[in-house]
Image (tube, grey):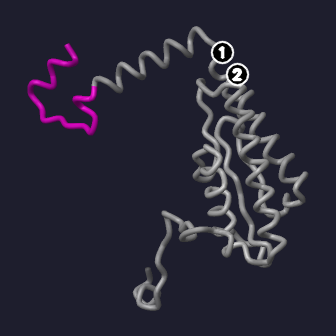
Amino acid sequence: DVMELFDEIFFSFTFGGDTISLAAARATLGKMRTEPVIEHLWAQGEKIKNGYNELAREHGIEEFTSCIGLAPRTVATFSDPSTKQDSPALRSLMQQELVRRGVLFLFGFNISYSISDEDVDHTLEAIRSAMSVMASAIDSGDVAGWVEGEIVQSVFCLLYTSDAADEGL
């Protein structure tokens, strides 16, 4: 009865014909009802978060990087050694070194149910090696010089110009 109303009105929505995502959502909800998905996300996320922070302490760089947030979806922070502000150079160096070790990293860790203990171990070993490089770069005083390419830039930023300020933007 409710759906018959759509015969008389205009309707449109972004994923209107996307039945694959509906099937995926249904399968995901089914898996979440029968398996310990949430517990797994928290457990694996805690291992990575705690491991990351412990490795930062071991390398003496805990004041420059840390892993924060809720375990299933954390964010790694990077602070410039001299200014204590956000450090795109350190983030770039971490990304570079993790990719070299087979871990794709943007700014944090999104845990899925498929993340195994072996995946966590591999990730932490890659972080250990990357942090060794980061510690050396920090000690050198030229973190940007260790990055082989362009420094990452924020995707979401407001360009501030004097014209924009004059217009109240």
Number of the label disc, if any, that sits on residue 103: none
Determine the secondary structure under disc 1: loop
Q: Position of residue 113 (x, y in %)?
A: 60, 24
Residue bearing the label numbered 2: 39
Give the residue type at disc 1: Pro
In this rendering, position of residue 115 left or right of residue 3: right
State how far apart marks 1 and 2 are (Cα). 5 Å
For residue 149, which quarter of the picture?
bottom right
Mark 2, Cα crowd under 10 Å, few <14 / some 14-19 / many 20+, is few
In this rendering, position of residue 58 left or right of residue 132: right
Question: Which segment did they paint magenta?
Answer: 1-18
Residue bearing the label numbered 1: 36
Give the residue type at disc 2: Glu
Q: Is residue 47 above or below residue 66?
A: above
Q: Is residue 38 above or below residue 79?
A: above
60 and 37: which is toward the camera: 60
Magenta span: chief secondary structure: loop
